[in-house]
Amino acid sequence: MPEATSVGALYLERLSERDLRLLGEDGEGAARLRAAPERILERIGSPEVYDALFAPWVEEPFVLASPLLVFAVLLAQSARELAERGHIREWIGPGRRVPVFDVEGPRAFAEDPLRRLFLAEVLASYTHVASGSLLVRTRRGWARRRFSELDPLRLAELVEVVPPAERPIVYRRLGDLALFLTGVFPDHVDARLFRPVQVERLTHLLGLELPEPDGALGLLERLGRHAYGRAAEAVGLAPRGPAAPSPTGLAAVLLEMPERFADARRLLFALTERHLFPQRERWFGR
């Protein structure tokens, strides 16, 4: 696990003054938290802060704290819950869940505060989503191409038209979208999400190989692993030899996401089932 002070400093860079005031304890102010960033991790994981945001009388946690802190607190709470549970529910189809006793992967992912920060940023980024259009040059001249951060195919099509320096951003966002959809909205990820022609287009754009049909969720998981891997390669994070320095901070989490995607997805689904389900439609995609 990364050193608490360094991870706390990453949280500190991202939290607002309002967040720091909420995290304060017994008059502890923002200045004290800045002087000891490791205290931020302790406070995010404390039951007192969880109760301050999610007590029955709290109608809207986003009024009290930023989305990043709200999700960081929920992920810390999920880590505590997973440490005590012998099974979690697994999504197997719209409206269908089964208990699974293999919880070690999601539990280990949740134990790392750096991984939790990575997931908190993913969740917070979907409280407001971007969409629009841009002009691209085609063989027939200029054309307007629409995009949406919630549409995997439209987002993947940007790989063809953005400058090479911006492709890592598109790949990273594709990985985030695949993780978000499969972890938070799996019931929406069924056969209707992709028509066969869209699957063909998506796999062609990204160079994906699908040896056998495995449904929309399986396609998105493959897409997420692939996109995170391409994002890491594009920004020079992929290992290039035994002497290459290891990435640190959130870059280290990005590098491991192709292998740990399923653990992250299952953690997000456990969090969704326990905490997000009633608020999903209200909190995301605004």
Image (cartoon, helix red, strand yellow):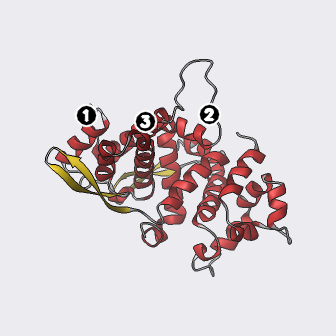
Mark closest to the chain's N terminus, 3 or 1: 1
Q: CA distance from mark 3 to mark 1?
A: 22 Å
Instruction: Tell me where residue 44 appears, x and y as whole percent.
Output: 71, 60
Q: Which residue is mark 2?
A: 247
**Callout 3 secondary element:** helix
Mark closest to the chain's N terminus, 3 or 2: 3
Instruction: Tell me where residue 257 appears, x and y as whole percent.
Output: 51, 39
From the image, state whether disc 1 or disc 2 is nearer to you.
2
- Quarter of the image for the C terminus: give it: bottom left
Instruction: Tell me where residue 101 appears, x and y as whole percent.
Output: 52, 44
Q: CA distance from mark 3 to mark 2?
A: 16 Å
* Residue type beneath disc 3: Arg
**Callout 2 secondary element:** loop
Q: Nearer the viewer, residue 248 or 208?
A: 248
Q: Which residue is mark 1?
A: 212
The residue that appears at 55% across and 52% down in the rendered structure is 119
Q: Nearer the viewer, residue 43 or 272?
A: 43
